[in-house]
Each structure stands twice: as C-alpha cells, then as structure tokens.
Amino acid sequence: MAQQPSDRLPVEDLNREQAAAEIADLSARVAEANDNYHRHDAPEISDADYDAFKARLLALEAAFPELAQPDSPTGKVGAGPAEGFGKVAHAQRMMSLGNAFTETDVQEFLTRVRSFLNLPGDTLLEMTAEPKIDGLSLSLRYEQGELVQAATRGDGTVGENVTANARTIAEIPCRLAGTVPDILEVRGEVYMSHADFRTLNGQDAGRIFANPRNAAAGSLRQIDPAVTSRRPLRFFAYSWGELSEPLASTQLEAVERLASLGFQTNPLTRLCRSLPEMIDTWTQIEQQRATLGYDIDGVVYKVNDLSFQARLGFRSTTPRWALAHKFPAETAWTRLDRIEIQVGRTGALSPVARLEPVTVGGVVVSNATLHNEDYIAGRDNAGAPIREGRDIREGDWVKVYRAGDVIPKIADVDLSRRPADSLPFAFPSLCPQCGSEAIREPGDSVRRCTGGLICPAQAVEKLKHFVSRPAFDIDGLGARQIEMFFADPALPIREPADIFTLARRDSGNLARLKNREGFGERSVEKLFAAIEDKRRIPLARLLFALGIRHVGEVASGTLARHFGTWDALVAAIDGAAREPAFAAADDKARRTALPDSPHWAELVGIDGIGSVLVNSLVTTFSQQAEREGIDRLVAQLTVLPAQSTRAVQTEISGKTLVFTGTLERMTRAEAKARAEAMGAKVAGSVSAKTDLLIAGPGAGSKATKAADLGVAVIDEDEWLRIAGTG
Ligand code: IVH
C-alpha cells in the first residue's frame, strides 16, 4: 500500500521504532527513484511524489538524526555508477550548481560573492551568463592532447567510465591540436537536439525516450559503443577539472581557449557587468528558448575572474562562484478533450488528459498526467483543496506546464470557459481493461484494479517491465514486440515464462515466426539467441523483473545479497506467509507478533527493507496464480546466486581479477557482476596488484604481461567452475 507522506503521522508524534521503519522505507523509495532517474533514464514516480518522499525523509532524519542511514539518498548529488561500466574516481569532484528562481535570489548571490571577496558594493564585478544545457555532464581527460578517459558525473566523486562511447561522438575530439596543457580535463554537457530526438524516437524499435535528456543519457550509457556511435549526440564545453597549467585568467577566455582547441562552446555566452545586464541576458536567452533546437532550463552565471573563482572555492556540492538561474515552468492554455484511464503494471488506474495539441516551450504536448482522482476533484491527498477546489472536467480549458524532464501536468482550469452542460468526471470503480473491481485502500492515493493476472493491461505492462533494461534486458524484445506477441493468438506471450518457451529450439516457433512481418530468419535467430542468453540470470535481476509492488532495483539487490540464492529467499518468503505477523491486520499488530514470526522478522530486519515491501512480497508469492507463474518461469532459468551477506568467504573474495579475450558462455558484464558478487574486484588492466587473469580466446598483451608479472592465468572453464556455474 503506497502511503503518501501527508497521510502519515506528524514526525513529532512518531516513536523511535516507527521512525526507523519509515526511514528505511523512504530511503529505499528515494534511492530507487534516484536510480531510475539517473541511471536508467526512466523516471517512474512523479516529481511531486519524489519531492514529498524526500521532504518527509529529510524531516524524519532531522528529528531522528541517529536513525539516518549512513548512505541516505538525501545526501547525494546523483546516483552511483550504473552496473556494466567501470568506475572512475574524478581527479576533481564534479559539482552541482546552486539555484536561483528570482531576481532577488541573483542579487543575494552577488552580495554573497562581494562580501566573501571583501569587494565594496560599487566595484565592478564581471559575470558571465550562458545557457544551462539540459543534458548530462561529462568529464573528458586529455593527456598530452590525447583523450584518455571520459566519465559521467555519477555521485560527483565516482562516475562511470564511458571512454569508448565518448570517442564515438563527433563533437568530442579524440586528439587536440596545437599547444595544449599536458593534463586537461574538459567538462561540459552531452545533449541531443530536438530534431535528432524526434528522428531517433521515430526509428528505434524498442525504446521511446521521454525527452532529449533521457535519450542523451540512454545513448551515452550503451554497453556497446557501436550503438552510441549511431546516436546523434552533441557536446558543449563550459568548464574544466584538473589542469597541469591554467587555461587563461578569465572564464570567458578559458572557454574561448576550449573553442580554439576544437570544442563547441555556447554562442549565447555573454559578459555582464551588473545585475541588470545579467537579468537582461537571462530574459533574452529565455526568449530564444523555444527556437534554440535543444533543451535549456536556465542561465548559469559565473564569476569571470578565475583568481576570484579560486578564492571563492566550493561549498559541499556547489561552487560559490556560480549560480543557475532557472526558467519558470513553461505553460500554455488548451482544451482537454478526454480523460482516459491507463492501467499500470501494479494495477494502478492513472488518469491521463488527452489535450488539443499545444506548443509548450517548443514541444508539442497532447497528453498530461492528472495524477489521481483527488487531483481531478481539486483536493490533495489529505483532502485539502488545490486550485481553490476547482475540479477538472472533460471539455475544460486547462493550463498545461512542462517543468524540465517530467510528463506535462495541469496547473489550472478556466471556469469561465467551462461548457454549461459539463459534468464532474466520474472516476471509474471498475477496471476499464478487464472489468474487475478497482479499489482504493485506506491511505492509498491510487485506485487499483484487483484483476491481477487476468487483467490484460497489467499483464502487458508486467511483461514490458520484465524485458526492460534493468530487468532481463533482452535484445530485440522491447515494448513494441511485447505488444505484438501479446496480441498474437498463434504465438502468445502472456507471461514471462512464455518468452522462454517461445525460444525453445524444438518448439517449431522459429519456422512459424520467420515469415512474419518484420522478422527474417536471421532476426528470429538473433532474438532466440538473445532470449537463450538470459536463461542464466542473476538473482537480483530476476527478483526485480517480477515487477512486485515496492520491490524495486535497490531492494531486489538488498534481498539478493542477504539471501544469496533463490531457494533461500523463497524459503524465507514461504515461511513468513505461514506466520502470525503476516496474518496481522496492521503494522502495530505485526510488531507484537514478531517474536513468533522468525521469517517475517528476518525479512523486515534487513537494512533498507520495510514491512510494506515485505507484505507485498509475501502476498504476491502466496497468491496461487501469481505463484504458479513465477514457478513456471523459474523452472526455465538458471538463477545465478548473489554473494550472500550470510555466506562464507569465496575463493576469490578480496582478490583483484582481470578479464581478457572473448568469454564464450558469459557476457563480460555478467562475469564482472558475478566476480563482484563473490567479493572480488575487477580491474581493466594487469598490474602487480592483479591476483588472477581470466583469459579467453584472443587474449593478447594482457596475457603476456600477466606471464611477465607471474600472475595466475585461468581459462573460461576454470572461471565458470569458480563462479559456481560451470
Ligand atoms: S558549470 C562547477 N555550466 O548543470 C560548476 N553547468 O545543475 C560546473 N550544466 O552539473 C557546472 N549547463 O551538468 C555549468 N553552462 C553550464 C551548464 C551546466 C548545464 C549542468 C551541469 C551541472 C548541472 C548543475
């Protein structure tokens, strides 16, 4: 049951135990939302929910500081590196920017800068002003003019190594001409233009990106650089990290120097000598926003004099010498034609406004989210009026806004233009897809279909989630193909297990499929091979892929690491299902039943796992139809164990491994994940610190170097034995 923070007790009324449980719960949700947003480029909860969860978590942490988790997601700039890329420690931290929303905020910033530098109010203080590009930041390290490393921001301290991918971007030079500092870290923004974004979304079979920023992030973080090379990414340079010698003495000249080295720099950059000039530049850039052809979300001001920048330095995550002056959300009025109800993977009924298409800040908008039935009725989750209580109806004129990354929303409604015969919107109490009852549990802001697996909408959404990138990530089987197979009476994929049945060699499906529209023999072969490849799946991915409510990627990883194997996890869940704590009606009763419920107690006792999640997990596993589906799936798979935190040491714990050559039975990413799960470190190159080299066919210089250094070398068979899957 998703409790909205505003439904919860006031922080001051909570006892320590309640606060601890809620902190665990919210930390997991916020961490997961961070993860989805930063790593997987797919926001799953609304910004408003995210803000509410985070605000509640901050309030709880302030009231109970001793309960705050050491790795609390409230203290982070972004998320840590995504699985699949090596990690890179930045030579200099990658910073974020402080925000300003009003002229007064900008004025206060200037006052702070002057007072820090002890400059009288009337001395000239030059500031640069430039667009704030809405992409993702990248740090490019050049040594002797050669691009040696490209890294994303990650959490600011450690990012992802995306060097091979960055090399494929035309606007990122691989070699710098002319006189260049020996060490030069160029920082800037990778982004995608509106035109390229539209073309890409039109051609890519599986994946529709929500916006250019997500498309840029998703394209840069492709495991295969060949994919990145086909994506139209661009790069604006605007800053730098480590330098072996200064670039210039002012910000403006330093950026000009980057331009002379072959980088694109933003042509709208201006030098300003006063607050009115800064605001004037901000206004001019905002006026050009819709026609620039790429997304910007504000203007960045920077102190021009680099010796001043050096004196001003940094706060914990932001420089004192720079400020982002954000644009207000863009809005437009249009007519709301219809309210449609979409049914999601967990059965949530989400109302969507179908609009007369309207341009909001250069982007045509024809849908907007309406959140839930309360939002439509003009009240918030606690029943207090929003929009002064004005409800939203079909046929109304509504004010739509887009704020940065998120799905457009409706801010207001114009009652003077409401048709005389309009009626309040009647939110359905039956699922529009399967006709099952849709109920709203106390404390939940969302109404949910109770049809479970019989609801086709839930089944399709579950399948799409199952094949998605952080889940089974099956090449060539995306949302589009899932819809096609789901609707096909001859080759049905109705549940995850069917995907693996489809690909069985003896099924005759290859012959059946190969003459279908869009499928040649080769592409069917490829699809089947991609499915086969995923029959071996790490425990955490399998658990996440099941799409159980509240069991996101972070929680799946936590549970996998705790239990180690599928059997141990299922034994705990099944045990908990028979215990009094699970049968108890509410959280309080559950806690009193804990002494008689050892499995339940173990589950809720795991750091970061709350009772809401455990309840959802145990409920799902004890529903017969759901359980049979899960069992049918698992019967087709080899579930790769995780290193259990309860488990004994493995033969590679604490060792440093290097993989080289081709692995034939395990992808590199999987081998790395497996090694790490077993407590080993995986390095990219052989050195005196290497303990073990795993050499597949085609191993070259690394194998020679390992031999020179006396490092032990094994082949793939031996590796599979160590990994416990040989
Ligand atoms: S300067 C130390 N300039 O905005 C300051 N950042 O919200 C480094 N960004 O992490 C940043 N356009 O990814 C700077 N013209 C610009 C920018 C810019 C976009 C991004 C950057 C930063 C984020 C902070």
Image (cartoon, rainbow, N blue to C red):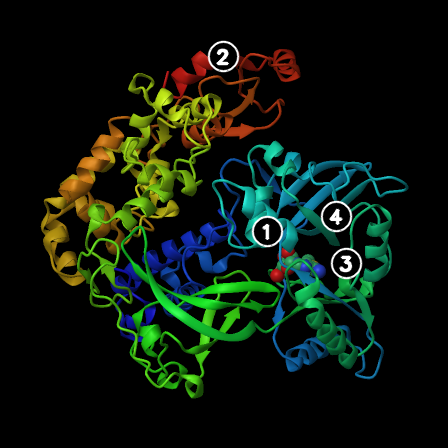
Q: Does the Cβ of the disc 3 residue fall within 8 Å of ligand 1?
A: yes
N-terminal-most mark, 4 or 3: 4
Q: Residue at x 41, y 24 (%)?
A: 514
Three-letter code for the amino acid on which mark 3 is drawn:
Asn
> Viewer-proximal residue, 604 or 550?
550
Q: Is residue 565 visible?
A: no
N-terminal-most mark, 3 or 2: 3
User: Could you give the CA–CA distance between mark 1 and mark 4, rounded to whole angstroms?
Assistant: 29 Å
Residue 561 as seen in the image, left or right of residue 233: left
Label 1 SS = helix
User: Could you give the CA–CA distance between mark 3 and mark 2, rounded to whole angstroms?
Assistant: 50 Å
Label 3 SS = loop
| Ligand 1 location (quadrant) | bottom right
Of marks 3 and 2, the one in the foreground: 3
> Viewer-proximal residue, 174 or 203?
203
Q: Which residue is mark 2?
A: 715
Label ID, residue 198: 1
**Image: 673 above or below 88:** above
Label ID, residue 186: 4
Q: Quadrant of residue 610?
A: bottom left
Residue 344 as seen in the image, left or right of residue 398: left
Q: Position of residue 367 (x, y in %)?
A: 45, 63
Q: Position of residue 605 (x, y in %)?
A: 26, 49
Label ID, residue 266: 3
N-terminal-most mark, 1 or 2: 1
User: Could you give the CA–CA distance between mark 1 and mark 3, rounded to whole angstroms?
Assistant: 22 Å
Three-letter code for the amino acid on which mark 2 is drawn:
Asp
Q: Quadrant of residue 87?
A: top right
Three-letter code for the amino acid on which mark 4 is drawn:
Val
